[in-house]
Image (spheres, rainbow, N blue to C red):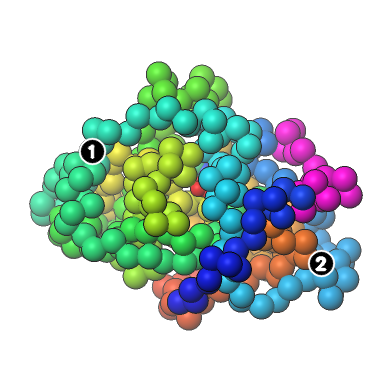
Amino acid sequence: MIKIKSSEITSKEEYLSRRDFLKTAGIVTAGAALLAACGAEEEIPATPATSNLPAEEVATDLTQELTAKESVLNYNNYYEFTTDKERVAKLAEDFVFSPWTVEVSGLVNKPQTFGIEDLLSKFTIEERIYRMRCVEAWSMVIPWNGFTLASLLNEVEPTSDAKFVRFETLADPDQMPGLINKLYPWPYQEGLRLDEAMNDLTLLSTGLYGESLAGQNGAPIRLVVPWKYGFKSIKSIVKIELTAEQPSTFWEGIAPNEYGFYANVNPAVDHPRWSQATERRISELKRRETLYLNGYADEVAHLYEGMDPNNLY
Ligand code: MTE
């Protein structure tokens, strides 16, 4: 894992001035219309994937410069608050997440409801620096704090019938103004296959940049699955259920032709409305080539042996 000195982190001023440049250059489009369903912030033609980008403008390396904390805290997707990424932080400012419990139930020998404090004291909190690739074709590098989902699942002992894990976010209309939009099938829910959930990369995050999670990032506990598009990384979890059947998920329920259950990052499979071949790393000018499984193939490609990677969108 590559640690980055704080001196190498892009400052807020530098980030903001680059954004101004991008806006002036017409590179960032508002994309308001596209947000009806999770949409690309930049309009990139679906195919041919990179034809409009000179090769030298696309970075291909795996360098891990951390995304500035200011950007991680102020550029968010959290539809329960708003679909406007730059207003989530403000709207989540007074989000009350204490007391908080996470119910772990379903096909387990020891169902339990954990208080957030129990989880924080029971498991060793570690730092994991992961790339996060949103399906909208932007990405960040984030230093998360948390513990593996496997350590929690081992505690409740899944039975031999358990094949999937289903997650659910709080849906509190008194605190979450976005819930007023009844077109969305609240509560937000997500799912993983049990072996994906047990993989060592799969994290339950309780903090970032060494501080507790802020409301806009999914306080007090959220999932982080770095080889899948960001929408799998469900925020503010209140329920985890082990099931025999593949659970339905929020975005798949809204637009099954656009968002699948697996949602594995794959530059070769375009979203129906835009290319996934490249991405914009927040605060960088050059686009980057998107990497298969977001660069984590060594760790997780074996989970998909015998399956067609192009069907795992
Ligand atoms: N979880 C919930 N409950 N609601 C959401 O709208 N958005 C997802 C994911 N988890 C979302 C969610 C999407 S599309 C992304 S890209 C990431 O959260 C963004 O996480 P961040 O705001 O911490 O960067």
Q: Residue at x 74, y 58 (%)?
A: 275
Q: Amino acid at mark 2?
A: Thr
Q: Is residue 51 shown in magenta?
A: no
Q: Does any portion of residue 192 appear in the rendered image?
A: no
Residue 215 x, y percent position in the rendering = 43, 38
Figure quadrant of the N terminus: bottom left
Figure quadrant of the C terminus: bottom right
Q: Is residue 165 left or right of residue 106?
A: right
Residue 174: quarter of image: top left
Would you place residue 60 above or below residue 175 in this image? below
Query: What element does badge 1 sit on?
Result: strand
Outermost bottom residue: 298
Q: Amino acid at mark 1?
A: Thr
* Labels 1, 2: front one: 1
Number of labelled discs? 2
Residue that badge 1 annotates: 101
Residue 68 x, y percent position in the rendering = 59, 56
Q: CA distance from mark 1 to mark 2?
A: 46 Å
Residue 156: quarter of image: bottom left
Residue that badge 2 annotates: 50
Query: What element does badge 2 sit on?
Result: loop
Outermost front residue: 7
Q: Residue at x 51, y 60 (%)?
A: 142
Q: Nearer the viewer, residue 312 or 3?
A: 3
Q: Residues within 10 Å of mark 2 (few under 14, many from 20)?
A: some
Q: Which residues are magenta?
A: 18-34
Q: Residue at x 82, y 70 (%)?
A: 57
Q: Is residue 115 left or right of residue 131?
A: left
Q: Answer with mark 1 or mark 2, whichever residue precedes in sequence.
A: 2
Q: Is residue 228 left or right of residue 112?
A: right
Mark 2 CB lies closer than 8 A to ligand 1: no
